[in-house]
């Protein structure tokens, strides 16, 4: 079963309302084994809607529309369905009666315009709306059926769950799972998973965020466990969690398991790492505190970074990151210290290019580790600065996770080393 989605309304087309209906429909249909092949948005214009319906049915087995079934004159879906079917609009006595009863029960006066919701293309089947006034419709057009649903989200979802999904659901339920990675770029992830991409009945989606990629696996219920196991094996320790896991929550859990705390020293991120580590309730049990030592002098005065090191190399240097991590760990009496220094932009600093970042992590034993994440930065606008800072936060938390687990600074996959940049 191949289905196209057609969401109708000027408010969606012009961006006044976020098209959450299409996102929900895509997820639910996929979960039920229905192949969603296209999603289109059109405005409140009769001929445009008719053309979109005919075009969609030239490709798909069925079309689901949302919106345009209300009582106002810009609700044109009924008229469009009638025109596409070559059928007249007729008043349904049963719909009119239920509409009048519903309005009376609410103690309101029925407006003549509301009776538009009792009209439907001749031959249409009514899809009961137990959550609202406007019913859904199933209309048979040349090329296949159209399921027309209200645009009000909870009404649309009710009709989908109660009527449409049972009709369209495929024989094998598809299951989706999401694995979360950090510190490895999308192209590296995709290359590592090439053999999984080639499997029949399995789909992978790569959902990138600055310095992180979520891998969504869609497969039949009978296959999903084996596919997930293979994806985990191919990605190795780059996977930090699954489902709703977040990197900060994983770090807090690892610290709690060890009875340990962490402190942070930040330069270019200006407190963003500390903010990320204090999102969770109860984070004070494992986050000791942090310092924003933005000025070069404060790295020496507050964290004990050697003055001669700063004088010789400036603030953006791997040895400075190491000293900052050790200094903040000792200052707060924490087991672990995390520090970042670098150039967020928009201009280079002390001969260092925008995106040059050093991350220091210090544990209770051994020398501090310093990582250069080699951020793939393009452009020098204000948006670049925000992206550099966000990527630095993710890389810093990932390096702390790796230290807590006793892993190397680089994620281990067959494709990771030497190919981390896009």
Image (cartoon, rainbow, N blue to C red):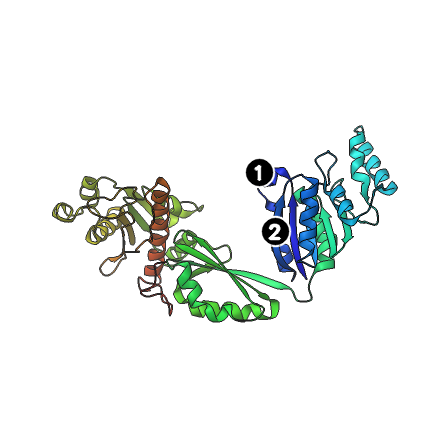
Q: Position of residue 301 (x, y in %)?
A: 18, 41
Q: Is residue 84 above or below residue 398?
A: above
Camera-side residue: 394 or 250? Answer: 394
Q: Is residue 104 above or below residue 145?
A: above
Q: Give the quarter of the figure containing the N terminus.
A: bottom right
**Residue found at the very far top of the displayed protein:** 109
- Residue 410 visible to an observer of this rendering: yes
Asked which quadrant contains residue 368, the reply is bottom left
- Residue 157 visible to an observer of this rendering: no
Q: Position of residue 265 (x, y in %)?
A: 28, 46
**Residue found at the very far right of the displayed protein:** 93
Give the residue pinned by disc 1. 14
Q: Give the quarter of the figure containing the C terminus.
A: bottom left
Q: Is residue 389 above or below residue 411?
A: above
Camera-side residue: 52 or 22? Answer: 52
CA gap between label 1 and label 2 equals 16 Å
- Which residue is found at the position 24% from the left and 44% from the top? 348
- Which residue is found at the position 66% from the left and 67% from the top? 172
Q: Please report whichever mark, 1 or 2, sits nearer to the chain's N-terminal start.
A: 1
Camera-side residue: 142 or 161? Answer: 142
Q: Pointer 2: residues within 10 angstroms few (<14), some, or many (20+)?
A: some
Secondary structure, mark 2, is strand
In the picture, measured across the screen, residue 414 lies left or right of residue 24, that is: left
Secondary structure, mark 1, is loop
Give the residue pinned by disc 2. 39
Q: Position of residue 418 (x, y in %)?
A: 31, 65
The label on residue 117 is: none
Q: How many marks?
A: 2
Q: Position of residue 268 (x, y in %)?
A: 29, 44
Q: Is residue 367 above or below residue 277?
A: below
């Amino acid at each position: 079963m191949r289905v196209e989605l057609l969401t109708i309304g000027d408010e969606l087309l012009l961006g006044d309302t976020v098209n959450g209906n299409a996102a929900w429909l895509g997820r639910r249909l996929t979960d039920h084994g229905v192949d969603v092949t296209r999603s289109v948005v059109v405005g409140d214009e009769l001929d445009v809607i008719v053309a979109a319906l005919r075009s969609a049915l030239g490709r798909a087995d069925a079309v689901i529309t949302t919106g345009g079934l209300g009582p106002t004159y810009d609700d044109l879906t009924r008229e469009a369905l009638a025109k596409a079917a070559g059928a007249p609009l007729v008043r349904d006595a049963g719909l009119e009666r239920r509409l009048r009863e519903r309005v009376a029960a609410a103690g309101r006066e029925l407006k003549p315009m509301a009776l538009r919701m009792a009209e439907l293309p001749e031959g249409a089947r009514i899809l009961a709306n137990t959550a609202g006034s406007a019913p859904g419709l199933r209309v048979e057009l040349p090329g296949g059926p159209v399921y027309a649903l209200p645009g009000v989200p909870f009404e649309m979802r009710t009709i989908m769950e109660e009527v449409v999904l049972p009709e369209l659901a495929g024989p094998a339920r598809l299951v989706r799972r999401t694995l979360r990675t950090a510190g490895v770029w999308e192209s590296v992830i995709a290359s590592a998973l090439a053999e999984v991409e080639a499997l029949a009945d399995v789909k992978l989606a790569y959902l990138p965020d600055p310095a992180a990629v979520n891998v969504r696996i869609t497969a039949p219920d009978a296959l999903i466990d084996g596919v997930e196991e293979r994806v985990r094996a191919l990605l190795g320790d780059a996977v930090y969690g699954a489902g709703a896991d977040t990197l900060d929550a994983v770090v807090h859990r690892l610290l709690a398991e060890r009875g340990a705390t962490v402190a942070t020293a930040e330069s270019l991120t200006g407190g963003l790492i500390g903010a990320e580590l204090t999102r969770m309730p109860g984070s004070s049990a494992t986050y000791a505190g942090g310092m924003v030592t933005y000025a070069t002098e404060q790295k020496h005065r507050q964290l004990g970074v050697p003055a001669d090191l700063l004088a010789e190399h400036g603030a953006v240097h791997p040895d400075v990151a190491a000293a900052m991590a050790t200094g903040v760990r000792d200052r707060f009496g924490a087991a672990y210290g995390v520090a970042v220094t670098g150039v967020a932009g928009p201009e280079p600093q002390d001969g260092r290019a925008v995106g040059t970042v050093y991350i220091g992590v210090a544990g209770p034993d051994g020398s501090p580790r310093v990582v250069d994440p080699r951020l793939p930065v393009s452009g020098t606008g204000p948006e670049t600065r925000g992206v550099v800072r966000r990527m630095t936060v993710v890389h810093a938390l990932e390096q702390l996770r790796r230290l807590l687990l006793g892993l190397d600074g680089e994620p281990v996959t067959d494709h990771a080393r030497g190919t981390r940049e896009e």
